[in-house]
Image (spheres, helix red, strand yellow):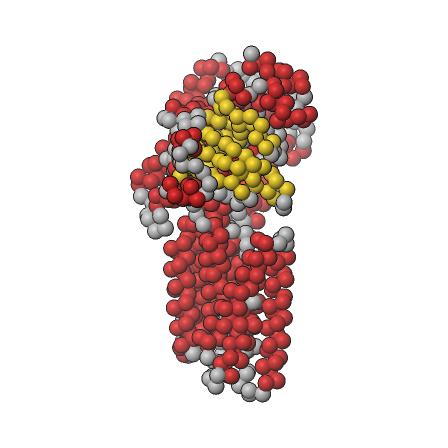
Amino acid sequence: MVELAAKQGVRPTDPSVQASPLAIRGLTVSYNQKPAVFSVDMTVQLGSMTAIIGPNGAGKSTLLKAALGIVRPVSGQVTVFGRPLEKQRARIAYVPQRASVDWDFPTRVIDVVLMGLSRELGLLGRVRMRHIAKAMDCLNRVGMHDFADRQIGQLSGGQQQRVFLARALAQDADLYLLDEPFAGVDAATEKAIIAVLKSLKQAGKTVVAVHHDLATVTDYFDHVFLINTRKLAAGPVDEAFTAETLQATYGGRLATAQIDQIAGALG
Amino acid sequence: MLWDALTLQLGYNATLVAIGATLLGFAAGVTGTFLFLRKRALVSDAISHATLPGVCIAFMVMVALGGDGRNLPGLLAGSALSAWVGLLCINGLTRRTRLAEDAAIGAVLSVFFGFGVVLLTVIQTMGVGRQAGLEGFLLGSTAGMLFADALIIAVGGAATVLLVMILRRPMLMVAFDAEYAAATGVPVHRVDLAMMGLVMAVTVIGLKIVGLILIVALLIIPPVTARFWSDRADRVVLLSGIAGGLAGYLGAAVSASAPNLPTGPIIVLISFALFALSLLLAPARGVLAAVLRHRRFQRRVHVRQGLLALAQGQEVYEPYTRRLLRRAGLMRADGVATEAGRARAAKALRDERRWGLVRADQTHEAAAAQYDGLRDIETVLTRDQIDEIDRRIGPPHEVRA
């Protein structure tokens, strides 16, 4: 393992990489030779809740997808709990954007959550009572147990998002990566999701979420990672989430008044 | 005659064809469902057209080697090989260039098919004499089907269905949410290739009965048919297999019942008939059910709006609403509510208030999600829950006539 890490250019002795649930070094991802993410380093703190923040098209989702190996980077390494990503799949759970799937797909809520158990079930394993019970428990945690038998298309947007979260919970992971979990959801869903994420943190898990609502950053997260193609700031919220870093990230796109308002709220 | 065909009493060849077509239909329906759910149904069209050059080249090679050019396993092996090359071409074009998949399919389909037709002509002028029969692979030809041919279909079909069952979970995951599947470590690209490989296997074993031009119908129509009847993927897969098998069996029987009816095209037409029936009659997604549902919904909306108007002492103007209310005995001809109408109106207004509270209360979220302005609250909440809500609303009030 040490050898592998060394071959990939990550110094295995670097303690921040060893201890970090997610360490990214020199990551560049491009679509048609236009970098969406350029030379980004990221070290997520164990047990933290980190918000990835940046304007539209800043590469937030791309960063997440590269961290998961869904898109192939031009350069860079990803280590998860100090080891290469491929060896740590079982410890990562992903909650994609809701718009990424066809909601008319013939499947029920419970079937979607059972997908979270696919590693455990393997190719031929039968779905047993204990799997159903576990899936129902995960639905219960997001307040969706009454909907288990519904076809997924019958749910509201917020409910669909909670089903995606339940599917990730079923994986029993240590690191949760979420892509805009609060985008376009109702207030009840937002409350339910943040309660679950905080309970994950309580249990010692690490949460990283792409987040778009600057007003709730300080309430929901303890760490931020500001990106606009390049990394612009990272660290605990009270250090890295300031008027200066926001200005640097959003440039002219965020009205100065808005930044002042947020900075004011930060005290 | 048709009855004899349906009960497999029309002789040896007809029986072989019927059994082969049933098995082929089942395998195609089951396999095609995954392609349909992955939204890549048209790839099967390219795969099937890409078999033609392989068939011709295999024929030429076998003749050149001094063998029988019409040896079926040899021809099928050749068709599989060129279909695989076609598949890799589509994959390469889509992944490595900026061509969209539909354009890649169009290019590969026409080029491979065109090349195949050229080879067919070459074979005809080769003077080998026994070239006859290769054209049969275009639309299928069952006239001279042998036991060995049926055996190939049976064994190939069974192997395909078995592999589909083994791979069903990753294939469904990739079809529903490829990014999530990739994030959990499912090798999405390889699963896709395996799925295409299975489709190719069905195409190849179907060459003899339905031919390469029409096999796509057996891969696509049964899943679409099955989708009308279920919202669960595992059931859609099974129903699609049954629809395909039924089409194969009925089609073979019908074509055997009269002279000069081509088997493949009849199977496709029967398959379409099953689709048309489903489109019309399926309970939840069918056209008829949708029309009826809309009409019933419209009636309920009008009655409800009428009752709420009465409850608030407003005049009901819309003729359709008035007609419905009068027919239900809720309103007199002069527009005044009857006794029953007043009671129903009061209840409608009260239910509106109850729903208002339910929808504002997060503990009732599941119930609130069922609100559509029409549903009776008693069908969603228990008596006790309604009493609790009523306590919060306060005492009922009468509707004046």
Spot occupied by residue B98 in the image (x, y as percentages of width and height):
63, 52
Residue at x-position 48% and y-position 40% = A77
| Relative height, residue B168 to residue B363 (above, below) | below
Residue closer to the observer: B205 or B255: B205
In which quadrant of the rendered image does the C terminus of chain B lie? top right
Q: Is residue B193 visible?
A: yes
Left or right relative to B315: residue A101: left
Q: Residue at x 55, y 57 (%)?
A: B91
Query: Residue at the spot x=46%, y=41% of the render?
Result: A9
Question: Residue B15 location, x and y as percent?
Answer: 41, 74
Say above or below: B285 vs A160. below
Instruction: Give the residue drawn at x 39%, y 64%.
Output: B158
Given residues A185 and B127, the one toward you in this image is: B127
Who is closer to the viewer here, B239 or B257?
Answer: B239
Percent position of residue B365, x then y: 47, 26
Name above or below for residue A6 compared with residue B108. Answer: above
Residue B336 visible in the displayed image: no
Marker count (numbered): 0
